[in-house]
Amino acid sequence: MPDLIVNKMHYPIKGILFDKDGTLLDFIGLWGKWSESMYRHYESLLPEGKIGSLSELWGTLHDETGRIVDYSRTGPLAMGSIGDLLAIFAWQGYRLGLPWGESMRLARESKRLADEEMERVRPVFPMPGIVPFLKQCSEQGLSIGIVTADETPEAVKHMEWMGIRPYFKTIIGNDRVERGKPYPDMVEKACLELGLAPSEVAVIGDTNGDMQMGNAAGAVVTIGIISEKAAFAGNGVLKDAKETVFSYDQLRLEASRHEE
């Protein structure tokens, strides 16, 4: 069992569970473009009226041109399920006078169109340093999984687009558990499939919901990964993380000093 070394602390582990968006892949590269597409399609499908801005609805942050450049780690886009995001949009249509069923239909149609656009452009980019770290985990014999608020088939697809799907022995999306983050269900299900106890795994994510999930399950350590820019701006609150890092360069694996 190797030690995961974080900020000079040693944590003996047998596995690591990663959040997906903002942890394995660049969040804005994928979800910024998807959100802009979804918003554009939904607004165009409404018969009349103006819906709230993406910033108000989903917690996105924009530059002076209106382009999404960051996101609130405590907002719906970061922490919500696809169902949550659809409901937020559907509420806008309902507020403008549409029946709920029709408004939800338009939200789902907007998602379909946005998904098709993402299929064409495939805007997924691995987080800096993640591929070398995954290789190191594999060489050390660690069991690796994904616990994500996204749907499982989407998570599998994104890993395949990046060419890193083989590293993961299990992928648990929001659709595979009764309760999503911050409840411990995803970690517990992933550990069951990996044949490990939660006390033998580390959880790495970019939102406090990830940290709360890992802590509730009894993970040996919860590690928040956040850019220095986001930390400085104050939109990346990770108050429940046991450890916080700015990049994967701050994580290291070596033979456990507890082994005889």
Image: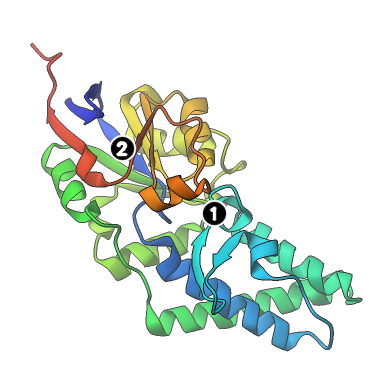
Q: Residue at x 45, y 78 (%)?
A: 118
Quadrant hosting residue 83: bottom right
Q: Is residue 227 visible?
A: no
Using the image, tell me which numbered label, if any, was put on residue 92: none
Q: Which residue is mark 2?
A: 16
Q: Left or right of 247: which side holds 192?
A: right
157 versus 64 height, above or below: above
Q: Give whichever of 183, 75 is nearer the camera.
A: 75
Tell me if mark 1 has few (under 14), some (14-19) or many (20+) residues whose alpha carbon lies within 10 angstroms of its own. many
- Residue 10 horizontal/vertical position (percent): 22, 22
Q: Left or right of 18: which side holds 76?
A: right
Cα separation, mark 2 vs mark 1, equals 21 Å
Q: Nearer the viewer, mark 2 or mark 1?
A: 1
- Residue 208 horizontal/vertical position (percent): 52, 39
Q: Which residue is mark 1?
A: 78
- Residue 177 horizontal/vertical position (percent): 56, 44
Q: Amino acid at mark 2?
A: Ile
Secondary structure type for disc 2: strand
Residue at far top of view? 260
N-term mark: 2 or 1: 2
255 versus 111 height, above or below: above
- Residue 36 horizontal/vertical position (percent): 56, 76
Q: Residue at x 45, y 63 (%)?
A: 153
Q: Residue at x 44, y 45 (%)?
A: 231
Tell me if mark 2 has few (under 14), some (14-19) or many (20+) residues whose alpha carbon lies within 10 angstroms of its own. many
Q: Is residue 210 visible?
A: yes
Q: Give whichever of 165, 241 is nearer the camera.
A: 241
Secondary structure type for disc 1: helix
Q: Amino acid at mark 1?
A: Ala
Quadrant hosting residue 191: top left
